[in-house]
Image (cartoon, grey):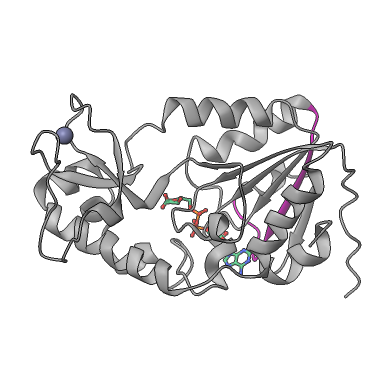
Amino acid sequence: MNLPPLDIRPDSSVVLLTGAGISAESGIATFRDSGGLWEQHDVSQVATPEGFRSNPGLVWRFYSERRRQASLVHPNPGHFAVSALEQFLASRGRFTLVTQNVDGLHQRAGSQRVLAVHGSLFKTRCSSSECAQGLCSWEDHSLHFQDVPLCPGCGSMLRPDIVWFGEYLDPAIESAAREAIADCDLFLAIGTSGAVWPVAGYVDIALARGARTVLVNLELPANANRFAEVHLGKSADLLPRLLPGG
Ligand code: APR
Ligand code: ZN
């Protein structure tokens, strides 16, 4: 099928928003597709602060397994097309990648300006809000599935640095994302169901700005009507053809 590339100029201001769909062809399960993560696990038990409080070991085993899987797979052509676009815009344009993904595949594909709005599988932080310990990379903890690591600073339990349901995004990351979108010419969403707020509302910021809104997704998500252009298909196939430098 003939698919003309998106006419992105080298001086464009572009924001990409990605979700689990862009990592699907690397072999990482999405959340809401059939057989997805939320069919296999009870969200309230593994992805909420209440779940962590009631069974931290289960939560650590859930994220340890996802981290193990993420470290075994590799970025796919969709991830590389995204980092090539960032290079294409590097000299005269502006580029921001806002990702909901926590798998680290964008960073491994060479993306630099990444706002990981839902955190990272490869970071932990102290569960005590008063603690000054801050983020530590997972490698500092030779964690086995049975143990729940404790903060070296205050002895409280460490937790995965993931934004759980019912929690706020990091304010600095969220405002950087909103600022970039409010200033973009092109907003391109890839592989996301648009089911989770506040990220689901980011396309409306782009629309209010008068930006071009493009969606690349396997199926039509609930918020598809918010996009001026929709390309249905697999991102690993479409992105190298749609994006310059891909
Ligand atoms: N190429 C493009 N899109 C794809 C592909 C693919 N190969 N495979 C699946 N998709 C699409 C699906 O059609 C779906 O619309 O990707 C989307 C994945 O949606 P979700 O599983 O809901 O993932 P996401 O949108 O990233 O979820 C958002 O919800 O559970 C929370 O914090 C979690 O960050 C996550 C957030
Ligand atoms: Zn601490």
The image shows residue 188 at horizontal and vertical percentages of 72, 47
* In-front residue for pair 244/210: 244
191 in relation to 71, above or below: above
142 in relation to 137, above or below: below
Question: Can I make out residue 234 in this image?
Answer: no
Q: Quadrant of the N terminus?
A: bottom right
* In-front residue for pair 229/25: 25
The image shows residue 88 at horizontal and vertical percentages of 81, 49
Write the start and end of the magenta stretch as one range. 210-222
Q: Is residue 60 left or right of residue 232?
A: left
Residue drawn 45% across the image and 61% down it = 32
The image shows residue 28 at horizontal and vertical percentages of 46, 70
- Is residue 213 in the magenta section? yes
Residue drawn 48% across the image and 40% down it = 117
Residue drawn 74% across the image and 45% down it = 227
38 in relation to 133, above or below: below
Where, by quadrant of the figure, is residue 89 drawn? top right
Question: Can I make out residue 114 in this image?
Answer: yes
Q: Quadrant of the C terminus?
A: bottom right
Q: Is residue 46 left or right of residue 67?
A: left
The image shows residue 38 at horizontal and vertical percentages of 36, 62
Q: Is residue 198 left or right of residue 223?
A: left
49 in relation to 172, above or below: below
Where, by quadrant of the figure, is residue 244 drawn? bottom right
